Image: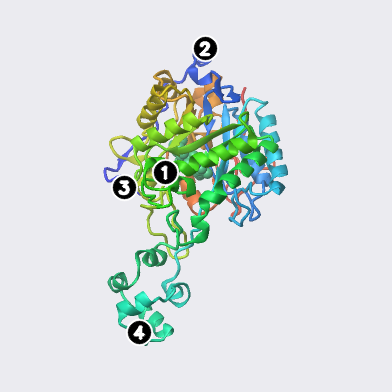
Amino acid sequence: MWKPAERIKYKPQPGKKPDVAEAASALMFTPVKLGPIALEQRTWVPAMVPWRSNEDGFVTDHVLDWYERFAKGQPGAIVIEATGIRDIPSGPLLRIGDDRFIPGLRELAEVVRTASRGKTRLLIQVIDFLTIRRRPPPAKYFARFLTITDEHRKRLDAHDWSEERIRTYLAQLPDSGLDEILTTAELEALRMGYKERVTDLHLPHVRNLPRVLPDLFAQATRRAREAGIDGVELHYAHAYTMASFLSATNNRPDGYGGTRQNRIRLPLEVFQRIRHVVGEDYCVGCRFLSDECIEGGSAIDDAKYFAVEFAQVGMDFLSLSRGGKFDDAKQPQIGWAAYPYTGRSGYECMPGYISDEAGPFGRNVEPVAQIKGAINAAGYEIPVVVIGGIHGFQQAESLLREGKADIIGAARQSLADPDWFRKIKLGKGGQIRVCEYTNYCEGLDQKHKQVTCQLWDRLQLDDFNVKLSRDGRRRLIAPEWKED
Ligand SMILES: Cc1cc2nc3c(=O)[nH]c(=O)nc-3n(C[C@H](O)[C@H](O)[C@H](O)COP(=O)(O)O)c2cc1C
Ligand code: SF4
């Protein structure tokens, strides 16, 4: 993963832990309304893909175990990982693209309700993504994938060469030679792996996205509701389709790109279609970016504009992430797909302990405060979730008190210790396992390996009924916390 050049090493600073009385008066543990539902407290476990589903996209026992473990910590909300809205093979990612997924999701909702004793609201993050392929071995790319065009013949002055001769010739050219012959898209397919963009209007299915996505998202939301899940988080963040529509890099000429008004058009049409299908009384919000953190990308002023528009159409919450784009991703190894968390924008999304002057803890807080300020100044009160390096009570409580956000999201800290909010509430903050922001978990995610935390995955391996990772070396969920 990319690291800031300063390479300053940070240790987590969880700060003072409150006693029970202090915790009882903490804003963090007061309720907050998300449109038609209420959270018992302002604590939130954001979406994290743990690679626990199967090739068919179903809720498995491992998926149930994963969310049950978070639910035992009784946070205000848990957001189920990015879940695909299409019924297409997507590897072991959860899916919600057909009614046959409803029973599994219903079981998941019940597991969370039981394990949290009804204290946790369950949301699901729904996602659309475009095709991305692995970086091919060059020989294979030239022999099979590249389409030989008249433009290649022209540039090579090879009008009468056979296609095979052109392929063989290209395969032995050095990089500098290829730069002269191949298009930018072809070079990207060779060096990074083929990837579709929302601006690829020559592809009919990409051109048609504004026609098909509203109903795909709406039907996914209907299924979530039928499964007894309390609400939906539309994934408008990071490297995926909807974020790409919002991006300042989106220059689609068909009314869905260019100006901010055009870029937000499809995200709003999706939301309107959802309201049409599921009505006003179901919780629907979105996750989007306070800043894309890429050159030429959307920045905070865009985010303020989007936030006010989302509030105006009646979204029930906004969760703000940052970065996580393909645009600055590192070149993957041959045989691997590009991963959107390997460049600077990836660092901004999941900052690790080796950092710059700003440090990894709470670098999204001030941008989020500004965005919340813009929403409130426009006369809206929609709750805003802040995420990014939050791991201590004081840090969380003071940003709530200062009105910088309404809800505290903590992904990696909750992975390190799923009981951490509860421990604070019970005055047992001294027992918290504090995240060290090493990004070991994120490294597993990158390789599509079952995600665990290095602080607990080798502990108590002989516990009764402990389930291990495929390699047999790691436990899959954090050990139980015995609250005595
Ligand atoms: C293993 C892992 C998987 C993640 N999966 C998702 C995801 O499915 N959807 C999403 O929006 N963010 C995902 N994220 C990003 C987190 O939700 C969160 O924004 C990020 O980790 C920063 O918050 P933190 O500093 O509290 O960890 C993932 C993060 C990790 C570590
Ligand atoms: S592996 Fe554990 S300690 Fe390291 S970043 Fe992930 S959650 Fe934190």
Q: Which residue is at a point 54% across and 50% down the rendered structure image?
A: 211
Q: Which comes before the other along the chain, label 3 or label 1?
A: 1
Q: Which residue is mark 4?
A: 159
Q: Inspect the image, locate mark 4, and give the three-letter code of the amino acid beneath it.
A: His
Q: Inspect the image, locate mark 1, and give the three-letter code of the amino acid beneath it.
A: Asn
Q: Inspect the image, locate mark 3, and give the three-letter code of the amino acid beneath it.
A: Gly
Q: Inspect the image, locate mark 2, and give the three-letter code of the amino acid beneath it.
A: Ala
Give the quadrant of the C terminus.
Answer: top right
Q: Which residue is mark 1?
A: 262
Residue 158 appears anywhere in the view: yes
Q: Does the residue at mark 4 contact the one at mark 2 (Cβ under 8 Å)? A: no
Q: Does the residue at mark 1 contact the one at mark 4 (Cβ under 8 Å)? A: no
| Label 1 element class | helix
Side (left or right) of 114 relative to 479 = right
Side (left or right) of 93 relative to 177 = right
Q: Which comes before the other along the chain, label 3 or label 4?
A: 4
| Label 3 element class | loop
Q: Position of residue 203 (x, y in %)?
A: 48, 61
Q: Position of residue 79 (x, y in %)?
A: 57, 36
Task: Tell us which disc is closer to us: 3 or 2.
Answer: 3
| Label 2 element class | helix
**57 vs 187, nearest the viewer:** 187
Task: Tell us which disc is closer to us: 1 or 4.
Answer: 1
Task: Tell us which disc is closer to us: 4 or 2.
Answer: 4
Q: Which comes before the other along the chain, label 1 or label 2?
A: 2
Task: Tell us which disc is closer to us: 3 or 4.
Answer: 4
Distance, label 1 to label 2, CA atoms, is 50 Å
Instruction: Say which mark, if any, is on residue 296.
Output: 3
Q: Which residue is mark 2?
A: 21
Q: Position of residue 278 (x, y in %)?
A: 64, 35
**The quarter of the displayed image where residue 399 is located:** top left
